[in-house]
Amino acid sequence: MSAEPEFSGLRGRFFAWFLSGPGRRVLEWKMGKPEPRILELLQLQGGERVLDAGCGSGFHSLLVAERVPQGSVLAVDVSTEMLDRMRKRVAARGLTERVEILQADGLDLPTPDSSVDRAMSAAVWHHLDDPQRACGELVRVLRSGGRVVVSDLEIKPSGHEHGGHGHGGKGHGRHGHDRPFGPDDMARILEQAGLVNVTVEMVGRWILGAGDKP
């Protein structure tokens, strides 16, 4: 979800494999397994149109697609390598009719206003210089009464933050995993985007935030 994808080329191919294979189980062992709670927070009934912004190789998109037999998932990412891996996984599970895959930047979604019932994003915001803009896009494409659910890692200050350069260029502060991100940041972003009934909770090292569009 940036002009220059962090997960591209060889790095993209590695993480596309890692995040859809045994490596994910290692992450879950170390950091917690938030997916059951994410699915609860989405409050799916089975017929929703769900946007997954920054879908990567499709881990969450596939979980959601299996729970919306009368609905669909719009999976968006900028990484060619991630989406190539995802297409194979979608086909292997027989979900091609239920999952639409779109290569696009989550900071500028080519998706109409008020066109989805749920909008989600996982492990993306701590990579971004402007997560508020990313949240604004989720809210824009969401129908009134719809719900946003976001998960991200809690990143504590390490004393090694970079100044002056980020994903967006000069003056944008810290970069990638060096950017601190906490529950207060999650709550602030969701509330400033105009969402109501905002909740924030921790599952292991994961921050889970949710809110409804008035």
Image (spheres, rainbow, N blue to C red):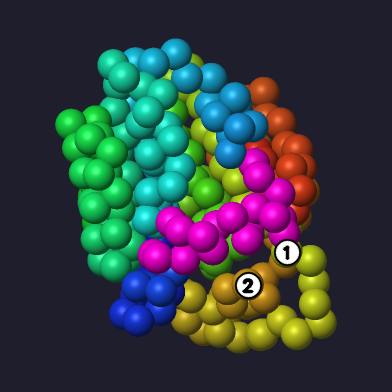
SS state under label 1? loop
Residue at position x 58%, y 73% from top? 176
* Residue tagged 2: 177
Cα–Cα gap, marks 2 and 1: 7 Å
Tell me if 49 is positioned left or right of 91 in this view: right
Q: Is residue 80 magenta?
A: no
Residue type, label 2: His
Q: Is residue 42 left or right of residue 51?
A: right
Q: What's the amino acid at mark 1?
A: Ile
Instruction: Tell me where residue 201 sits by quadrant.
Output: top right
Number of numbered tags placed on the structure image: 2
Say if 11 sits above or below 67 in the image.
below
The answer to whether the residue labelled 2 contacts the one labelled 1, judged by CB atoms less than 8 Å apart, is: yes
Secondary structure of the residue carrying tag 2 is helix
The mark found on residue 155 in the picture is 1
- Helix, strand or loop: magenta stretch: helix
* Sequence-earlier tag: 2 or 1: 1
Q: Residues within 10 Å of mark 1 (few under 14, many from 20)?
A: some
Residue 35: give x, y in percent of width and height. Answer: 58, 39
Asked if residue 31 lies left or right of residue 140, the reply is right
Crowding at dot 2, Cα within 10 Å, few <14 / some 14-19 / many 20+, comes out as some
Q: Is residue 70 visible?
A: yes
In the rendered image, residue 30 lying in the magenta stretch gets the answer: yes
What percent of the width, then of the height, locates residue 126?
A: 60, 62
Is 49 above or below relative to 95?
above
User: Is 192 situated above or below 126?
Assistant: above
- Residue 120 percent coordinates (x, y): 48, 39
